[in-house]
Amino acid sequence: MRRWSATGLGLLLMAASVFGFNRYAERVERQAATVEAIMPTRLIASGETVDASLLRRVRIPKEALPDDALRDEGSIVGRTAVAPIGPNETFAAWKLANRQLTPKPGERYVSFPTTDVTNVGNMLRRGDRVDVWVEFESPVMLGGAAKGALKVAEGVRVASVRTSEGAEVGDTYGYDAPFQSASTQRERVRASANGKPGMNTFIMTEPIYEAFALASLVGTIKLALPEPSLESEADARVTDEFEAYRNQLMAGEEPT
C-alpha cells in the first residue's frame, strides 16, 4: 500500500512538473513574441506637449510595433504632437516635434481674424509653422518682373487657432487606426477639424508684425503650410523679396 502511495505521489509530482514547465514555456514563448512599447494614457491632441504623466509601458505583439515607434521616454517627453496620438497607439517619430509655443525675447503674441480658406482649408493647427504670402488684385512690378503674389515671411509660429467661440481647433480623426502606415495617417490626419477657425494667434517679432500688417493693407493674406512633421531650426524672418517691395513703396514707386 505504501509503495502504491509513493508511486501515486511520484506521478503527481511528475505531472505537476510537466504542467509547470509547459506554463513556463508558454510564458517564455509569449514574451518572445511580444515587445514593450510606450503608449499614451489618453488621447493626445495636436499641439499638445507630452509630459511623463501621459506615458505608459505595455507589451504588444512584436509584428504590431511600427518601425518608427519611439521606445525611449527621453525622446518623447517635452515634445509637441503634430497629429493626434490615440491611447492605443505607439508614439510615431513623425508625430512629434520640438516646438516652443511661448514667445522668446523680442517676440510677442499677435492675433488676427481668419477663415478656413486662409487657414489652408482648415488644416492649420496650434504649433505649426507657416509661410505668409500676400496676393495682389493686380500684378506689381518688382525687379523688372510682374508679381501676382509675394512671400512676406517664413517660419512664423502658430500659437493658437481658435473658433469664434474661443475653442481650440484640433483634429478629430487620424487616431482611430493606430497600426496604419505613417503615409496613410499623414493623408488623414488633417482631413477633419473639430471647428471652424475664427482667430489665429502667432508668435511674431516686431519686423514680422509690421510686414504682416503692411501686406494685409496692400493685398490678401495667404498662409502656406509645409509638411507639419518637418521641423526647421531657422528663426522666422521677413523675406528679402518683401523687403525689396517695401523699399520700392517707400521710394514712391507706384506698383503697375
Image (spheres, rainbow, N blue to C red):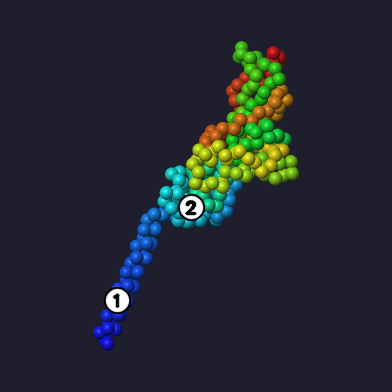
Is 176 located above or below residue 227 in the figure?
Answer: below
Residue at 48 percent of width and 56 percent of height:
57
Residue at 60 percent of width and 25 percent of height:
239
Is 227 located above or below residue 80 in the figure?
Answer: above
Q: Position of residue 177 (x, y in %)?
A: 54, 46
Residue at 68 percent of width and 32 percent of height:
117
Nearest the eye: 244 or 135: 135
User: Which residue extends farthest bottom?
Assistant: 1
Q: Position of residue 33 (x, y in %)?
A: 39, 54
> Which residue bears the numbered disc 2?
38
Viewed as shown, does residue 25 lie left or right of 97?
left
Nearest the eye: 151 or 175: 175
Quarter assignment of residue 10: bottom left
Q: Position of residue 171 (x, y in %)?
A: 62, 43
Query: Crowdedness of circle 1 by 10 Å Cα count: few (<14), some, many (20+)?
Result: few
Q: Which mark is residue 241?
A: none
Report the amino acid beneath label 1.
Leu
- SS of the residue at dot 2? strand
Nearest the eye: 118 or 14: 14
In which quadrant is the C terminus drawn?
A: top right
* Residue 65 seen in the current view: yes
Nearest the eye: 125 or 105: 125
Q: How many marks?
A: 2
Q: CA distance from mark 1 to mark 2?
A: 45 Å
Q: Which of disc 2 and disc 1 is earlier in sequence?
A: 1
- SS of the residue at dot 1? helix
Which mark lies nearer to you, 1 or 2? 1
Q: Position of residue 196 (x, y in %)?
A: 70, 39
Q: Which mark is residue 11?
A: 1
Is 191 located above or below residue 221 in the figure?
Answer: below
Residue at 32 percent of width and 72 percent of height:
15
* Residue 106 seen in the current view: no
